Image (cartoon, helix red, strand yellow):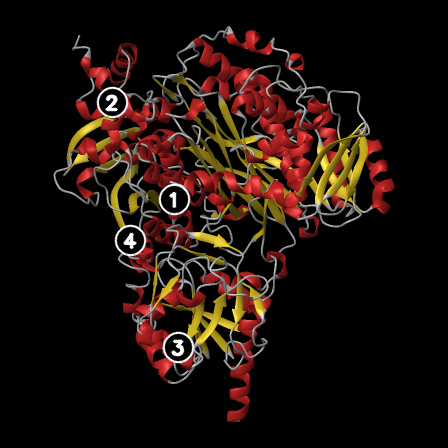
Amino acid sequence: MPSKQRWDEVGLTENEYRMIIDILGREPNDLELNLYGVMWSEHCGYKHSRAMLKMFPTSGPRILQGPGENAGIVDIGDGLAVCMKVESHNHPSALEPYQGAATGMGGIIRDIFTMGSRPVALLDSLKFGPLDNPRSRYLMDGVVSGIAGYGNCIGIPTVAGEVGFDPCYTGNPLVNAMCVGLIRHDEIQRGAAAGVGNSVMIVGHTTGRDGMGGASFASVEITAESEERRSAVQVGDPFMEKLLLEACLELFKTGCVVGIQDMGAAGIISSTCETAARAGTGIELDVALVPKRETGMTPTEVMISESQERMLVIVEKGREQEVYDIFDKWGLHAVVIGHVTDDGMLRVLDNGVKVGEVPAKSLAEAPVYRPSYEKPAYIDELAAFNPLALPLPDDMNDVLLKLLASPDICSKRWVYRQYDYMVRTDTAVPPGSDAAVVRIKGTHKAIALTIDSNGRYSYLDPYKGGAIAVAEAARNIVCSGALPIAITDCLNFGTPEKPDIYWQFRESILGMAEACRALNTPVISGNVSFYNETDRGAIYPTPTVGMAGVMEDVKHITTQAFKKDGDAIVLLGETKEELGASQFLNIIYGMQKGKVPDINLEKESSVQKAALKAIQEGIISSAHDCSDGGLAIALAESCISGGKGAYVNLKFDIRTDALLFGESQSRILISLKPEYLDKLFVICESFGVPCQVIGTVCGDRLNVDVNGNKVVQLPIEEMKDKWEGTIPAYMNGR
Amino acid sequence: MRFGVIVFPGSNCDSDCYHALRDVMGQDVRYVWHKESDISDVDCIVLPGGFSYGDYLRCGAIARFSPVMQSVQDFAERGKPIIGICNGFQILTEAGLLPGALIRNRGLKFICQPQYIRVEHNRSMFTNMCQDGQVLNVPIAHGEGNYVADEATLERLEANGQVIFRYCDAQGECTNEANPNGSMDNIAGIVNEAGNVLGMMPHPERVCDPILGGTDGRLIFGSIVEWVERRIANAK
């Protein structure tokens, strides 16, 4: 047997090395071993997640393309469809925040236009350590600039997102980027290398040594030595990608493209073996033909380079000139590097000399593992904590202001104002409401988009946390006036070989899957990011849910802002005495424990249906999801964004802090003209949804009485100052 | 009349301008690829926003060498209207068609937000549908919109009435707080001495369709239409 180093150096196990020998009937040479090393990395091979991902519902009448392609596609009627995917770029962003985040955007945008779809919106979910840590500020500043630098330049609006903070993300920030495109059903492209003899072309940018082994790097924990692997981070060129985007969309119109695949992680190797595996064919290519940006690159380096802004295109034999013409117009490379074969092999030549040959399918199908899992001891321990044993705070004004000023809840304007969220002139609802709304020119339709996660809930109860992430995303979509239709997910977890981590992963998926089924939002694409660990431990399990909704008519657009004095304020859903796992406990007491709020998906579905029906009947002035910080925060946000006050009179027999700040699920805060109340009651009754008039939009203060006692009395201006001041104070004050 | 929207590699507000002019304003409009040289069929040239050539080197510094720019130069000399928006403004200053330069925003960050601007006067082909001192809401989205020029140039701009738009607050006051990027004298848009070449950082094409939150951009494009049509009528 060879020395242990051989498989170690490419990040494989001895057993996996033996599997390769079985496949090949011989020992792999260095190039071949490297190909397996990258393709069987967790990042490319989904070794530890593939079995569990099967638990997700992935089909439905609207689903035109489920997981397995570059991105998923869901029908929105009239021959139109939405193409979307979310992906992580956590590890690169931890080392080099600007380029890490920028190339994250570049990669996810390519996934969308590879499908033939015009990208129309970007979203992002970002998690950092606390802002009083200079490293967290450095990372946030770099990541936000990187997203802005790429998205603004390429001209795709960043329309929505979320930013959260927790010590668990200090050394391992999360950067989850989502791209959404529009496409007509007859324009869908697929990533299959079909048709023996067809030409295999590389188009776009040149190939260099940047991003070597990025996929393997993303498949290990972040350690002190990670800094030395900075060269594994790619460098983005949004201008090049803008040209590539326009050239590809123009190319598809010619009909000469048989298959196309983005060169993301693992570059040429992943794109060739995946397209060949999908079509059941083989590919022969010559690395000497690949346009390079530096000299002396070995065949292995060319194969695994992760240089950005490149695409693999399979073109009908004899129609290469059409590709040359279009790419020449845009000033881009387009070169034939090989052809499709019928023997199922990926054959790598260097100047005509064979340097490696392996079955394409074997690269694309990494071994599947079902790691053992075990419920960690902390779960029951932390759930046993009873927050009702804490004393009742005596100044609710003070509590409300503290919550509004907390980094998780406060305004993220500092972030989104750096993103061009208006370019393309389709952003009907910009960042700052429950979901962004992007209208579709030439139709009455619009799509609503949101991205959500809650690491704290998922840490305390991953099953409920996963279900709530889906439910909350759907609630946001409904509040904007759209029907939720599908999700894309980014599963951020620690090291899957650890039984407690795998238990979190498993529970999260089961919870999400149940919610997806209940709310009729299948999973159409996604990404798994494991090994989000540093020497200080794993991040909270953080499943991120990106969701799309469809709105048949833009007249249904609804925002969270209170609109008109005299409107009645109504709370849909049930408020329970639930303070566990809340932002209230987190911010006021520094406690992350207690029972995660219950989620009854049947009730959730009813509340959403009732709210959407009311919106579609045109009787609703504003709608806002009650989530982080509970009813009081939802009221404050509706007041601040509308510049309108409210008088609210609550009569409940639960503790005041739980009433104001508890995070009971399945609740929506709405406002409407008083004369529409009767219509609303009828709708709510038909869906069996509790519905309570709690106040009136009026004045310039938020006044809340609870059982006759004045507990909140705050001017809108004061709340707004607190809510808007936090992030600028941290980020501009340096 | 017909508008021509120039498409440089990296332009990304080209289709927004095209849509606003054709579908919202009901005007005839065509794209002009940056390698074209014959633009005699159009009556107004639009240099749209975006990141021409990636804004590498300097914003607009490479685009000014595009083949079409020679024709744009001639177009300007013949007194025909040219409107450069955002990156288009940057290209016009790089090409020497407008004085001054646009440098990094005061806060060093890209800024995208709704923005009030004040119409300095309506004696321009770009503002004849506005009132003197009227406050428009026209959003900005740029990283390098900080207008600078030497003192003599600034004096000349003021004396000739070449400052067309200034950043202001909702009441029309041009305060320092209302200045998003540090531009000298709150300058948001200027014209050349002849008055037919306008450069402005705010994006009028983003506020033509009411679903996007405003229609003030129509006043600017509408003014151009009004001026060109009157000229065509007079010529007959």
Write down the residue under mark 1: A145
From the viewer's perspective, is the residue at label 1 or at label 3 nearer? 3
Residue at image point 39% right, 81% down: B193
Sequence-wise, the earlier of marks 4 and 1 is 1
Write down the residue under mark 4: A332
Chain letter behind tag 4:
A
Q: How far from the left and from the top, in percent, is residue A123?
A: 49, 41
Chain letter behind tag 3:
B
User: Do discs 1 and 3 share a chain?
Assistant: no
Disc 4 from disc 1: Cα separation: 27 Å
Chain letter behind tag 1:
A
Q: Is residue B76 above or below residue B113?
A: below
Under circle 2, the secondary element is helix
Q: Are marks 2 and 3 in contact (CB under 8 Å)?
A: no
Disc 2 from disc 4: Cα separation: 37 Å
Under circle 4, the secondary element is loop
User: Hey, which quadrant is residue A633 in on the image?
Assistant: top right
User: Do discs 4 and 1 share a chain?
Assistant: yes
Disc 4 from disc 3: Cα separation: 42 Å
Write down the residue under mark 3: B157
Residue type (three-letter) at the residue carrying disc 1: Ser
From the viewer's perspective, is the residue at label 2 or at label 4 nearer? 2
Q: Are marks 4 and 3 in contact (CB under 8 Å)?
A: no
